[in-house]
Amino acid sequence: MGFWIKGNILKKLLPLILWFLVAWIFVTALFFTAYYLKLEGDVSSDLALRGLDNPLKLWLHGYLGQFFHFTVMGFLSWLMIPVYIYVFLNGNKVGRPVQGVLLFLALFGVLIAVKGFFNHRYIITLLPAYTVIVFHFVGNFLSRKTSIINPYQLLFSFAVFTSITVLTVSFVSNRTDSDWNAIKMKYYKWISARDHKKKIVKKSATPFATINLLNDTTIPTSVFVNELPIFYYYTNLKGIYYNPLYDFYYSAHGKVKLLEDRSDNEVVAYLTDSLNCRFVFTSKSKNSFNPRFADILQSRFDTLAKDSYYLLFVVKDD
Amino acid sequence: MIQTLIALFLFLFTNIFCSITVMLLFNHFNKSDYVSRWEALLFGLGIGPPVVTLMLYYLLLLLPGMHQWFYLFIICFTFIVIFYWYAVREIRLLLPVGPRTIMIRWHLDASISLKGQHAWEGWRRIFSEFSVKPKFYTEGMQFNHWLFLLFILMFVWLWMRFTLKYPLVEHDALEYAVQGMIFAKNLNIEYVTHRFDTATNFYYVGLHGFSFPLLSTWQWLFNLPLGFKTDFFFRLQSGYYFALIFLQVYLSARRFMKKQAIYSLLSLVIVYWFYDMLFDYHIDSYRSYLFFFAVLCIFILLKSANRAMVVFTALTCGLAAFAHSTAALALAFCMPVILLYYPGKILKRVGVLTMFFVLVVFFGAGHYILDTLFGTGWVFGLKETY
C-alpha cells in the first residue's frame, strides 16, 4: 500500500501510463482505418497490383505510405513527427548539422511521397535513418521524464507491440468466409510462397523444369516472353519481351502494341508470321495482368510444359 | 563447387578488400576525429563494390571492346596499388598488438622502412606498443556487443544457407542481372534511346544507374573467359548489404545509446516487410545502405567541415545516385542543405558546393545527365511506373 501512497512513484509512472494510453488509442484507431483499406476499387489498373486501387488506399498506402503502410514502415515513423516539431521549435539546441540532415530527410520523404508513392519499396529507404533518429530523440526525451523504465526498452516494446498488431490486422482483414478461414488462407499462402522456392529444381543448371526444357529442345523460332527476364538469364534463345499490363512488346525502335486493333485470330497470325514466335513463355501471375492475352493462350495455344511457376505454350496446329 | 569458391574469392576481394582499401584511404586523408578510424572502416565495409562498378562504368564507356582481363586487371591493379601505397600505413593504426599480428606488423613496418624510414624504427615501435594493452581488451566485450555479434552470426548463417541453396529467380534482380550480363558480353556501355539487345531481343526497362547491373557485369567478366556460369557473387550482395545496414544502425545508435543499441536494431528488424525482404535477391538493401551512408556523411560533413569529408560525402552521394534514381533526385535537396548549413561564410559555402557538385557528377550522378541528353531520357521520358 505504501507504494501507492507515496506520490512520487505515481508521478514518475504517470507519463508512462499516459504514453501507453495515447499509443493504444492511436494505434487502435489507425488499424481500424487500415482494416477498411481492404475495400476494393478499380482492380484493372496497375495501381491495383500495388494495393492502391481506391482513393483512400492511394492516399494512405501511397502518398502517406510512410505513416500508414504499417507492414512496410512499422510504426516508428509516426514518432518522427514530434521529432520534427521539437527540432523546428528548438533549432539552436540541436545544432545546425542535425537541422540540416532532418531537413534533407523531410524533403526526401516528400519526394518519395510525390514521385515514388507507387512503389512501397522506396519508402523503406528511410527506415534505418528514422529508427536511429527516433531512438535518439524520443529515447532521450523519455529518459528525462521517467526513470522507472528504460526508455529504449519502452520504445522497443512499442515497436514489438505495433508490429504484432500489424500482422494480426493483416491476417484478420483478408476476409473470405469468416475471419478464421481468412487466417488459415493467409497462413496457407505464406506457406505456399515458401514452397514456391522449395520447388525450385535443385542442383540443376537452371532453376525450373520449363527452362530446362527450353534449353534442351531445339527451338527454331523466337519465344514470346511474357515479361519474365528469367528467360534471358537462363537460356541463350531469342525472345520477344512483352509487357502484359500495358500491352506492348519491345522492339529495337521502342514499344509496339500487340492486342490493340487486332482480333484474336490476327494476334495469333501476327505472333507466328510477323514475329516468328510459335512459343509463349509465361506464368499464371503474368497472365492475370492481361485477361485477353490469357484467353488467347487458353484457346489458341497448347500447354507444352509447366512447372511450379512457369508455363510454356505452343501454338495449336490447325 | 570450384566456381562457387572462385565467386566467394571475388566477393572477398570486391566487398571486403576493396572496401577496406577505400576506407583506409579515407582515413589517411581525413583530419576530423568525429568518427574513429575503426568506425569509419566498419561503416564503409560496403563502399568497395560501388566504387568497382563506377570504375568499370568509366572503363566500358571510354575504353570499350578490350579483353575481359584488361578491365579486371586495371581495377584489381589500381586497388592493390592504392592499398600498398596509402592504406598499408593506415593499417598500423588499427591493428591491436598481439602475437598473431606481430608478423603482419613486422611486414608493414619493413615496408614503411623501405620508403625512407630506418628499419630499426619499425622494430622499436613494435616493442614499445607491445607493452600497451589495446583498447579492445581493456574495455572488455560489452553484453551489447555479444548480442549484436550473436544476431549477426545468426543472420550470416541464414543468409549463406539461403544464398547457397536458391538460384536467382526474382524479377527485378533478374532485369539488372541480364543487363549486366549483356554489358559483359558486349564489353561496351553506350547511351541509346532504346536499350535493346539485338542478340537476345532483351529490352532493359530500368531507369536507374548502372551500379547494380555492373555488379553482375563484374561477375561475368570473370565467368566468360573461364567458362564459368556461377552468379554466386551477385546473389551474395543482397544479404551482405542487409548485414551492413544492421551494422550501420547499430554503430550509429551506439554513439548515444551506449549499451542498449541493440534495441534500435531489433526494432528495425521486426518490421514485417523488412523481415520479408531479407530473403529476396534485390537492389533494395544495396541502395538503402548507400543512401543511409550518404546521410551519415552529410551529417559528419556539416558537423566537422573539412576538405577530405567534402570529397568523401560527394563520393557516397554520387555512388548512391549511381545505384538508384531516388538518390539521384535527392541530390536536388542535398545541395541546398549543404549551402544552408555548411559552416563558414557564404563564399566558402558556394565554393564547397561547387566542388561537391563537380565531384558528385564525376562519382556517378553524371550518368543521369548523359542518359537524359543522349539516352533514354531518364524520368523525363517515363510513361509507365517502374
Image: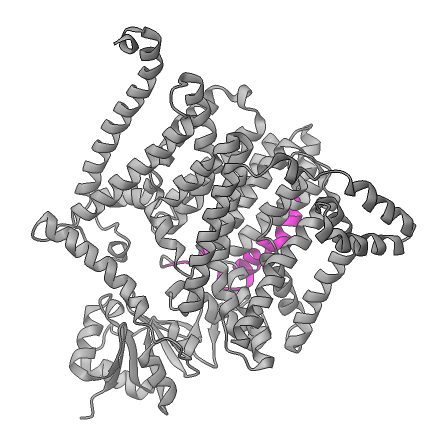
Q: Which residue is rendered at x = 70% and y = 40% of the image?
A: B134
Q: Is residue A89 left or right of residue A313?
A: right
Q: Nearer the viewer, residue A179 or B91?
A: B91
Q: Is residue B55 left or right of residue A146?
A: right
Residue A135: x and y, percent?
A: 44, 31
Instruction: Give the vertical position of A42 relative to B127 (above or below).
Output: below
Instruction: Give the vertical position of A234 relative to B303 (above or below).
Output: below
Q: Is residue A266 in the magenta section?
A: no
Q: Which residue is rendered at x = 50% and y = 56% of the image?
A: B240
Instruction: Give the vertical position of A317 relative to A124 (above or below).
Output: below
Q: Is residue A2 left or right of residue A124?
A: left
Q: Nearer the viewer, residue A40 or B198?
A: A40
Q: Main secondary structure of the magenta part?
A: helix
Q: Which residue is rendered at x = 49% and y = 70% of the image?
A: B179
Q: Quadrant of residue A297?
A: bottom left
Region rendered in magenta: B354-383
Q: Quadrant of residue A301?
A: bottom left
Q: Is residue B375 in the magenta section?
A: yes
* Residue A147 visible here: yes
* Residue B205 visible here: no
